[in-house]
């Protein structure tokens, strides 16, 4: 399997795939010109956004020379076909959304087990990239989550990588949630004993042949401290 764990794969304000940090170039290398695609919902009970995203991506992939011959959305209505749909896909896209909601769906359909031995190209988008970790950090994001003692911040994931990704740092670094600063007051505290790899849109982790690379601007939060790891167009072996 080759995987691209992105913050966002698209140019800001557009569905076009973002070429920075070699992303489009590497996608072209990894994918056949004719490709069947499976989009896995973040919320299986509200799949309309995923259907719209899938159609946008059909056009965006065509623009880089990759034709998505079959586009299927894995949602509640067809979740019993997960094994068949996963096995027949050459490209699987784990869509963005609410991390715990998507994580629950992944566990219900046994996606971790379905991906074992699967030999294709996988792309994570935001929450999809976060849920690709072995142990997922579900950064609080909705009102009430940061102060809810029952909210689970660490969840079992797909086990594709050991790295905990936090996306959209360029957008979210100054956010307030439940009267607290999302990063300084919440995420830094959660990083005690953990490492979080914080990506801006356009940056990603590329995994192939048992090796992983961090591409583009990224930061590390560990034990309450944030440090910059890399800048745009830089590549770091993980």
Image (spheres, rainbow, N blue to C red):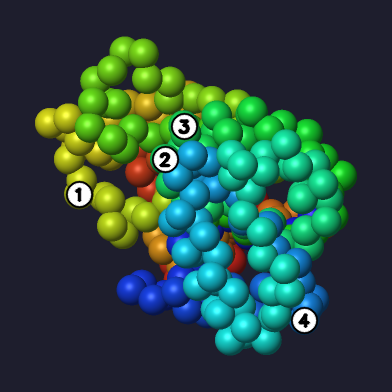
> From mark 4 to mark 3, how far is it between C-alphas?
34 Å
Q: Disc 3 vs disc 1: which is toward the camera?
A: 3
Mark 2 or mark 4: which comes first in sequence? 4
Residue 205 x/y as whole percent = 59, 57
Instruction: Give the residue number, with chain letter if any, for mark 1.
Output: 174
> From mark 3 to mark 1, how far is it between C-alphas?
22 Å
Q: What residue do we see at 52% from left, 60% from top?
A: 51
| Secondary structure category for the residue under label 2 | loop
Query: Tag on residue 98?
Result: 2
Residue 221 x/y as whole percent = 41, 40
Q: What residue do we see at 71% from left, 31% from top?
A: 110
Disc 1 + disc 4, Cβ < 8 Å: no
| Secondary structure category for the residue under label 4 | loop
Image side of residue 64 versus residue 14, left or right: right
Residue 140 x/y as whole percent = 33, 33
Mark 3 or mark 1: which comes first in sequence? 3
Above-or-below relation of 89 to 32: above
Crowd tier of the residue under label 3, counting other residues whose Cα lies within 10 Å: few below 14, some 14–19, many 20 or above: many
Disc 3 + disc 1, Cβ < 8 Å: no
| Secondary structure category for the residue under label 3 | helix
Query: Tag on residue 33?
Result: 4
Above-or-below relation of 21 to 215: below
């Amino acid at each position: 399997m080759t995987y691209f764990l992105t913050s966002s794969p698209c140019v800001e304000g557009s569905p076009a795939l973002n070429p920075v940090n070699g992303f489009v170039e590497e996608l072209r290398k990894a994918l056949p010109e004719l490709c069947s695609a499976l989009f896995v919902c973040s919320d299986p009970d509200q799949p309309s956004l995923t259907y719209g995203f899938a159609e946008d991506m059909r056009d965006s992939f065509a623009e880089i020379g990759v034709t998505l011959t079959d586009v299927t959305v894995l949602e509640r209505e067809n979740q019993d076909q997960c094994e068949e749909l996963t096995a027949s896909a050459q490209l699987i896209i784990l869509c963005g959304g609410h991390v715990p909601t998507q994580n629950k769906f992944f566990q219900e359909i046994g996606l971790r087990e379905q991906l074992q031995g699967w030999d294709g190209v996988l792309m994570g988008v935001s929450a999809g990239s976060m849920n690709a970790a072995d142990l997922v950090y579900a950064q609080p994001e909705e009102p009430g989550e940061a102060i809810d003692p029952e909210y689970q911040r660490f969840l079992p994931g797909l086990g594709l990588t050991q790295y905990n990704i936090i996306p959209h740092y360029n957008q979210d670094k100054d956010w307030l949630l439940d009267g607290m600063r999302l990063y300084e007051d919440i995420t830094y505290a959660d990083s005690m004993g953990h490492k979080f790899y914080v990506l801006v849109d356009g940056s990603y982790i590329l995994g192939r042949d048992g090796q992983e690379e961090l591409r583009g601007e990224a930061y590390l939060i560990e034990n309450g401290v944030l440090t910059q790891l890399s800048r745009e167009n830089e590549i770091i072996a993980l």
